[in-house]
Image (cartoon, rainbow, N blue to C red):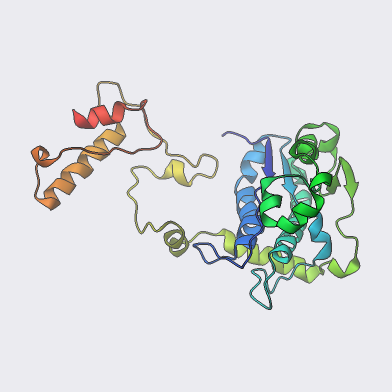
Amino acid sequence: MGSVDVLINNAGALFNPRQVTAEGFEKSFALLLLGPCILTERLHPLLKAAGDGRVVNVLSGGMYSQRIRVRDLQSERGEYSGSVAYARAKRGLMILTEEWAERWAKDGITVNAMHPGWADTPGVETALPAFYRATARFLRTPEEGGDTIVWLAAATEAGRVSGRFWLDREQHPSHINERTRESAEDRVELLQILEELRESTADFIEKASGIKSRYVMNKNGIIDPTRLTPNLPERPNEAQSIQCEMGVAAAREAMKQAGKSSSDIDAVIVAASNMQRAYPAIAVEIQD
């Protein structure tokens, strides 16, 4: 089994007006809270295998203005604000940071959160144009914003502390106002909701991908969370590769259903991933 030494959850965007994903989730919630939750939980075995794995969650000082609303995680009530939805999702990720730090301490995993400060990035310029115009000369460089991320990921001293919120390599409180502090009941309910949403179902996968069915020769490698890729047995060079075998079978079935022969076909487009042999070998094999 492999391992993951460091996981940095840094994907982010600010959406206005309210938008939903193909799965029906509000985009801020999906990208900033649910996505990192699913990814981090599923990578836990690999982080544990590292012996001293680290998770760094990139947050925002905007979370200081918001309390988590567990009964409206997807901002369905009242007037929508992208900035508020963003801040609430980041508040939720801070809660997860503290929960993971406590739960995974026995596994040697440290989990911390950080605020990069306001940095001069295309995301800030696009999402907050008025703010950007007013503050552009004061913004940090991306390198300055990323400094604490790298430090938390690599520094020896950073590996001795877990479950904290950082800015400029210094610890900061996760709350500066008691009105934003969640109750114990809120934390429990948030974790329960996220746990339920972590489980994929056939309906969820079909809605997300549009795929109703897929043929898999051997699913063991695909559904193994420590691998997540097909486990293709080796074949000698003189034998057809697995992808060639599948491609030829699919082409013959398609021609049969269409009432066509190979002489009727001018060209075949071949697309494959996880190839056994270097491209374009599979196309040559199928052509032969």
Seen as rendered, the residue at the extreme bottom is: 78
The residue lying toward the viewer, choosing from 232 and 29, is: 29
Where does the image place residue 61, in percent across and percent down from the top left? Answer: 82, 55
Quadrant the N terminus occupies: top right
Residue 199 seen anywhere in this rendered image of the structure: yes
Query: Number of marks in the image?
Result: 0
Where does the image place residue 12, in percent across and percent down from the top left? Answer: 66, 52
The residue at the point 14 percent across, 46 percent down is 255
The residue at the point 67 percent across, 77 percent down is 77
The residue at the point 50 percent across, 63 percent down is 23
Check the image and report above or below for 235 versus 181: above
Q: Quadrant of residue 210?
A: bottom left
Quadrant the C terminus occupies: top left
Check the image and report above or below for 183 versus 141: below
Check the image and report above or below for 105 versus 206: above
Q: Quadrant of residue 48?
A: top right
From the viewer's perspective, tell me whether residue 92 is left or right of residue 74.
Answer: right
Where does the image place residue 160, in percent across and percent down from the top left? Answer: 85, 38
Q: Quadrant of residue 144?
A: top right
From the viewer's perspective, tell me whether residue 185 is left or right of residue 80.
Answer: right
Where does the image place residue 72, in percent across and percent down from the top left? Answer: 68, 73
Residue 240 seen anywhere in this rendered image of the structure: no
